[in-house]
Every structure is written in C-alpha cells, then in structure tokens.
C-alpha cells in the first residue's frame, strides 16, 4: 500500500506561520465561536471527507517505521518523524533524551487568552512482532483491507483522488500494521483534528501540550525520571490519555483510571540436561509438570487467586464508581459468543466488575518442544511468564512477595539465579523467580468538574458514552497523578483491534469519530 504523496502530507500553514505569509499587517479571518461539540464535530467531518487520503497517508507512512522499544535506531526515527509532524503544525517540539533509548517527544502550542492547559499522552512504541504470525507476514508494511480479516476483509489499494473528487474511504475498512491502534492512530488523529480546526477557523479553547513516549510497551522504565528532570514543562490542568480501545459495544468510552502492572518469570528445573523419555521417564522429575501444578494451584476453578493476602489492599469503590459500573452496557454474552467462550471465569461477576480487581495472568509457557519439533525427552527446565494487574492502593513489590511466599509454601526452594549443582542436589524443587518491575495504578474521581466536562463534550460530539472507573489495561499514569494532574482516558480505536497481538488493526470509522471527539475537546474543554 503506497501513498502518492510527498513526505509532508499537509498543505495548511502551521499556526505560527499564519502571520508570516507576507510583510503586510495580517488580517486574519474573523474567528467563529466554536459552538457546541456537535457543531464542531460536523465542521471537522466536513474537513475530513475532503482530506481522508491526506490523513490515511500520514498515518501509513508513520506506521511504516518499525517501533519496537528495544530497536533504538528505528525508535529514534519515529521520534524524529513526530517532531516533523508537530512542527509542521506550528507546535514547538523538543526531544527529552533517554540515553540509548527512544526519547520522550514533548510539544507545546499556546492559545492566546486560554486559561486551561490540556496535556495529551500517547506512546509511539509498539509490542514486539513475530512476522510469521501475521497474515501478510509484514507488520511494518501497512495494508488496507475492506473489513476485518475474520470477516473476510480483502486487501485493496488506497483509493486515489481526482480533481474536484476526493478519495472515498469506507468506515469499515481497516489498516493492518503494528501500532495501527496502539498508539500511532490516536496521535495522528489529534494532529488531524488540529488541521481541521484551523481549516474551519475554529479557535482552540486551551493551551495544548503533548507527551509521546517511546518505551511504554517496555514498561516505561525511564519515563518518571525523564519527566522529573523536565517538570517545569508539565504545568497543566488535566492529562488526556489516548491509550486503549473504545467499549466493546462500540460506544465511545471515557475512563478515569488504569490498573498498575508488573511482570515476573518463573523457571523450574529438572535434570541438568534433557533426557531420553524412554530411558529416564517415570524416574527423572519433569519440570513441565512441576510448573503446571504450581500455576494451577494459584487459582480456583472460577479464576479467583488463592494466594494469601492477594485481595487485602483492594479499596472499596465510591458511590459514583458503583453507579457507573451499574450503568455500563451488559454485553458479556455477546463477547462470549464472539470469542468462543462457554463459561467465563469470575464466578458469575461481569467483566467490568472483574476489571476493578487485581488479576494474575499466565502470559506464556515453554518447555522443550511441541508440534513438528517435538522430541521424546524429559525437559531440563520449564518456564512461565506472568503478568499481574493491580488496582489503586496496591504496591508491586508487596504483591510480588506474596507470590514468592506462595511458591515457597508449595515446597519450592526459591532463588533469583540459575541453580548451582550443589543447590540442585540439595533441593527437590527449585524455582527461579525474577521480578521484572512495574508501577502502581492511578485513579481520578469521576465527579470532578473536569471529569464531568470531558464526558459532556465526548457525548456532545459522539453520542452516549460509557463511563468506566478504571480501564483493565495499564499505563504509567501514576506519574502524572503524582504531579497533581487529573488523568482521564479518551480512547478511540475499535475494541477488536488485536492490540498486543498479530494482525493489529484499526477501523477507519473509529478514527473519524475519534478525530471529531479530539477536536471537540480542544475547542471546548473549559470548566
């Protein structure tokens, strides 16, 4: 899929250049009042239908730059492209460096007479990729399809515009590429919303700052320290995060918190080398069985964690949060049909209720080989990779120690290194448990004036929204919470976007609606 355009796709002058076009005193057109969110959305839609090819091409060119956080040369290319994209709109841009990694991209656009400052957060890095698991085998070569692959979507070329006839795109078409949904599309939609507001002469109601991170999918190990060094740049009134999908019902979503997260790796050991299963089976301990038994003992048949103290630090929900959960769409049955689930975990609780609790997930297991590469052996070791999601009030290190204590109670000698031969000979069960680090949850009260105003604008621009106390996913929003900023999530991408998996995609109709929502927020977010 190729764009027949130059690298810089927009032709509108940046804000800072409007007064520099000639030496004569500028006579700008009389600004119109932004009006209600619905009117702003209509104006933005009118701009969009005539510029869809420009917007899609900017997005696909951005998606073409590989963006795994550990790929430093390419992640820095992403940061440089972001600076170009910001400066083309007249946004003052800076790279906040991180040694050997992708920098934080900071941008600032001041609005005369604005009394509020909105900070917009997103990340430009993506999850690691296994090209062989992607349908087209090319996660960084964006493909346009007529629908979701599961719905029979076919690959097509980008439509071409003709004089007086803009290129036409269907709302159900999808772009497939790594970070098509998480998070490059929201970044481009924010910038496209600025273009539309400028083209329609709709003034911004706020000062705008942007923070685009390049290590979120690697756990944001340097974000807090980097922002602390540049705290003078972060004065603001609210932070809007774009991370995450809309609600599974398709309705817009506004959320007021993120769960915290940390990861850990567990390795169990058998003999020092893999052994012939015929000669040594029934005698040599099998580490795959040991890991399986250990993991199975961590939860009951309904998925409730059995580790001592696991739920002790969970705070009760507020009255407004309970009300919001009760009003959320009850679409669990639809999700069960869509995902082929006969009986979900949770002991009868709804998905939205379970997302307000801590979780324990096995994200992967490995021991020897399976399929065509399977070998008749007793494996030498077995590995399991887990992630833990936490709610407000829980600490990663404390929760990790609860898990370690549970593993010890199951009879394992717990270490944080490869076992020595002496340790192997002395201990029948050995588990290496490695803590990968993480961060705490964040939560903003739903009844703050700014919280109510964001919901009002989103609903005015896009219709009834789902209000969620806390999103199930994680992002390092605690950093901004510690700076005194309310953190509110306004995601825009489709819920079935394959986020964190192969065949990641974004539905164009979601992008167009998200562009209208972001424009309405920029034009009307005052409280």
Image: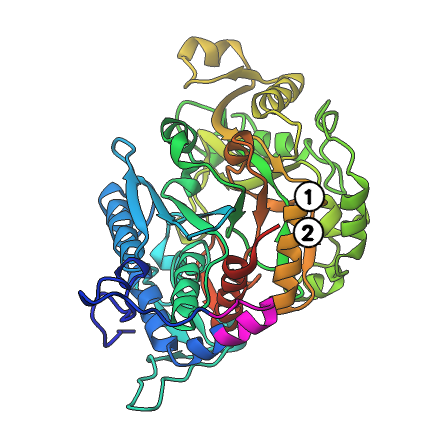
What's the colour scheme? rainbow
Q: Nearer the viewer, residue 447 or 301?
A: 447
- Residue 102 in view: no
Graded by Cα atoms within 10 Å as few (under 14), some (14 to 19) or many (20 or more), the crowding at tag 2 reads few
Residue 47 shown in magenta: no
Q: Residues within 10 Å of mark 1 (few under 14, many from 20)?
A: few
Q: Residue at x 27, y 51 (%)?
A: 83
Residue 385 image point, x, y percent: 51, 36
Using the rendered image of the protein, determine whether residue 93 is visible from the camera's viewpoint: yes
The quadrant where residue 201 appears? bottom left
What label sits on residue 448 in the rendered view? Answer: 1
Q: Which one is nearer the viewer's eye here, 2 or 44?
A: 44
The N terminus is located in which quarter? bottom left
Quadrant for residue 90, please give it. Answer: bottom left
Q: Position of residue 461 (x, y in %)?
A: 60, 67
Q: Which residues are magenta?
A: 32-43
The spot of residue 304 in percent (x, y) is 74, 37
Measure the alpha-carbon separation of dots 2 and 1.
6 Å
Q: Nearer the viewer, residue 440 or 80?
A: 80
- Asked which secondary structure carries label 2, the reply is helix
Q: Seen in the image, is 287 located left or right of residue 4?
A: right
Apparent side of residue 450 relative to residue 244 in the rendered image (left or right): right
Badge 2 vs badge 1, beta-carbon distance below 8 Å: yes
- Residue at image location 44% in from the left, 29% down from the top: 380
- Which residue is more in the foreground, 447 or 216? 447
Is residue 38 a member of the stretch shown in magenta? yes
Query: Could you tell me which secondary element the residue under label 1 belongs to?
Result: loop
- Residue bearing mark 2: 452
């Amino acid at each position: 899929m190729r764009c027949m355009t130059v690298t810089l796709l927009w032709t509108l002058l940046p804000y800072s250049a409007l007064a520099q076009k000639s030496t004569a005193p500028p006579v700008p057109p009389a600004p119109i009042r932004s009006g209600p969110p619905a009117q702003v959305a209509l104006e933005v839609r009118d701009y969009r239908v005539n510029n869809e090819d420009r917007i899609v091409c900017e997005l696909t060119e951005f998606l073409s730059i590989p963006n795994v956080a550990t790929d430093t040369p390419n992640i820095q290319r992403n940061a440089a492209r972001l600076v170009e994209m910001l400066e083309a709109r007249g946004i003052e841009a800076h790279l906040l460096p991180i040694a050997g990694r992708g920098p934080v991209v900071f941008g600032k656009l001041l609005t005369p007479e604005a009394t509020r400052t909105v900070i917009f957060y997103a990340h430009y890095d993506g999850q690691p990729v296994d090209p062989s698991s992607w349908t087209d085998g090319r996660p960084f070569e964006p493909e346009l399809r007529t629908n979701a692959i599961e719905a029979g979507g076919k690959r097509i070329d980008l439509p071409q515009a003709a004089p007086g006839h803009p290129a036409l795109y269907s709302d159900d078409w999808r772009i497939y590429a790594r970070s098509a949904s998480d998070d490059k599309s929201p970044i481009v939609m924010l910038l496209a919303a600025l273009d539309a507001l400028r083209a329609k002469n709709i003034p911004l109601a706020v000062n705008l700052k942007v923070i685009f991170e390049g290590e979120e999918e690697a756990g944001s190990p340097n974000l807090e320290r980097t922002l602390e060094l540049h705290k003078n740049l972060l004065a603001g009134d609210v932070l809007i995060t774009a991370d995450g999908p809309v609600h599974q019902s398709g309705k817009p979503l506004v959320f007021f918190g993120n769960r915290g997260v940390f990861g850990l790796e567990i390795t169990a050991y058998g003999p020092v080398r893999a052994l012939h299963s015929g000669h040594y089976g029934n005698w040599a301990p099998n580490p795959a069985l040991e890991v399986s038994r250990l993991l199975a003992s961590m939860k009951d048949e309904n998925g409730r964690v059995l580790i001592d103290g696991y739920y002790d630090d969970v705070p009760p929900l507020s009255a407004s949060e309970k009300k919001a959960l009760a009003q959320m769409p009850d679409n669990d049955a639809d999700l069960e049909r869509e995902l082929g689930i006969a009986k979900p975990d949770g002991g009868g609780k709804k998905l939205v209720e379970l997302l307000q609790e801590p979780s324990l997930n096995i994200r992967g297991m490995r021991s020897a080989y399976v399929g065509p590469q399977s070998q008749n052996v007793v494996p030498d070791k077995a590995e399991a990779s887990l992630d833990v999601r936490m709610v407000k009030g829980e600490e990663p290190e404390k929760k990790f120690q609860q898990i370690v204590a549970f593993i010890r109670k199951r009879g394992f000698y717990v270490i944080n290194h490869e076992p020595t031969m002496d340790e192997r000979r002395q201990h029948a069960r050995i588990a290496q448990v490695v803590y990968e680090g993480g961060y705490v949850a964040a939560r903003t009260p739903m009844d703050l004036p700014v919280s109510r105003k964001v919901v009002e604008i989103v609903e005015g621009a896009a219709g009834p929204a789902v209000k969620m106390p806390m999103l199930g996913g994680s992002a390092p929003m605690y950093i901004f919470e510690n700076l005194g900023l309310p953190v509110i999530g306004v995601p825009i991408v489709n819920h079935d976007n394959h986020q964190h998996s192969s065949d990641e995609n974004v539905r164009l109709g979601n992008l167009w609606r998200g562009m209208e929502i972001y424009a309405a927020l920029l034009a009307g977010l005052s409280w």
